[in-house]
Image (tube, grey):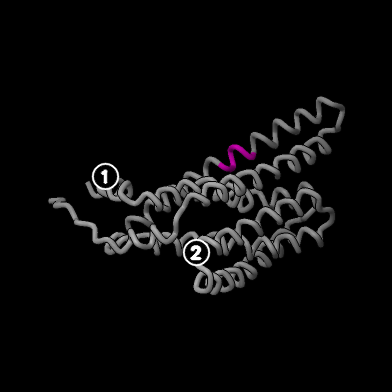
Amino acid sequence: KRLANTFRTARGFREFLKFIIAFLVYNDGIMIVMGFASIIGATLFGLQTQDILIFFILVQLTNVLGAYLFGWLVDSIGGKPSLNIALALMVVVVAWLYFAEGKTTFFIIGAVAGVAMAGAQSVSRTMVALFAPPGKSAEFFGFFATFGRVSSVVAPLIFGWLAAEAALWFEGRGQGVILAEQSGLRLAILSIAAFILVGMVLLIFVDEAKARAAALTTVDEPDLR
């Protein structure tokens, strides 16, 4: 009953729902980066196990920097502009990754990506908090988490399928197996940017001011006995 009530409540907050749809799309791109970073590093840049461990430590450290930086930005310019900056930075990272060569460059890209991903994720959570009405924060965050789980399943499937199909296409045109795998993976990287850019377009339709005003509305609790 409470879950059904959450869905009914969310339908009354149109800006929140528009934000959740945008989040579902751009978060697909972020989930691909998080899930395939080690595979991309090993396949395209020759990273070994120790290199990958160092890479993820570096990303975690820059995550902390990104969370603080974008927390300050939200206070200064608002949630939606801050989120757009983080997502735009992610697009730059993906474009850089597509053309990049060499381990050092990959580590630098990882550091920048850590800042951008932390920014996108922390600002997204902040916006849910700002958009949730009194007494409904836990339910709205549950709604948000559900869509985040969907992204973590759908995005890797799409990326993996694209990389595999592209590799077969390159192999069919005379490339060796290893080179075809690298070419297919590099081409699939562009799908990350596509998800993020579509998410940014959907964010255009989210009115942060209206969402914050709606969040001030008291929602009547139904009798669940």
Q: Which residues are magenta?
A: 155-159
Residue at horizontal 53%, vertical 69%? 77
Q: Nearer the viewer, residue 203 or 29?
A: 203
Residue type, mark 1 in image: Ala
- On screen, residue 75 above or below 113: below
Figure quadrant of residue 130: bottom left
Provide residue 217's location: percent of width, then percent of height.
27, 61
Question: Which residue is identified by label 1?
Answer: 4
Which residue does the image show at 73% across and 60% down from the upper left?
109
Give coordinates of residue 216: x percent, y percent: 30, 64
Q: Callout 2, which amino acid?
A: Gly
Q: Is residue 64 left or right of residue 95?
A: left
Q: Earlier in the sequence, mark 1 or mark 2?
A: 1
Q: Residues within 10 Å of mark 2 (few under 14, many from 20)?
A: many
Are the residues flagged by discs 1 and 2 in contact, CB closer than 8 Å?
Answer: no
Is 98 situated left or right of 197 in this image?
right
Q: Residues within 10 Å of mark 1 (few under 14, many from 20)?
A: few
Q: Position of residue 129 (x, y in %)?
A: 39, 63
> Which residue is the extreme one toward the top?
172
Q: Is residue 113 magenta?
A: no
Picture residue at 64% right of the left edge, 51% below the top = 33
Query: Which element type, helix, strand or loop, lies under badge 2?
Result: helix
Mark 2, residue position: 79
Is residue 199 positioned above or below 80 on the image? above
In-image side of 151 versus 211 (left or right): right
Q: Secondary structure at mark 1?
A: helix
Residue 150 percent coordinates (x, y): 47, 44
Q: Observer-nearest residue: 19 or 36?
A: 19
Q: CA distance from mark 1 to mark 2?
A: 28 Å
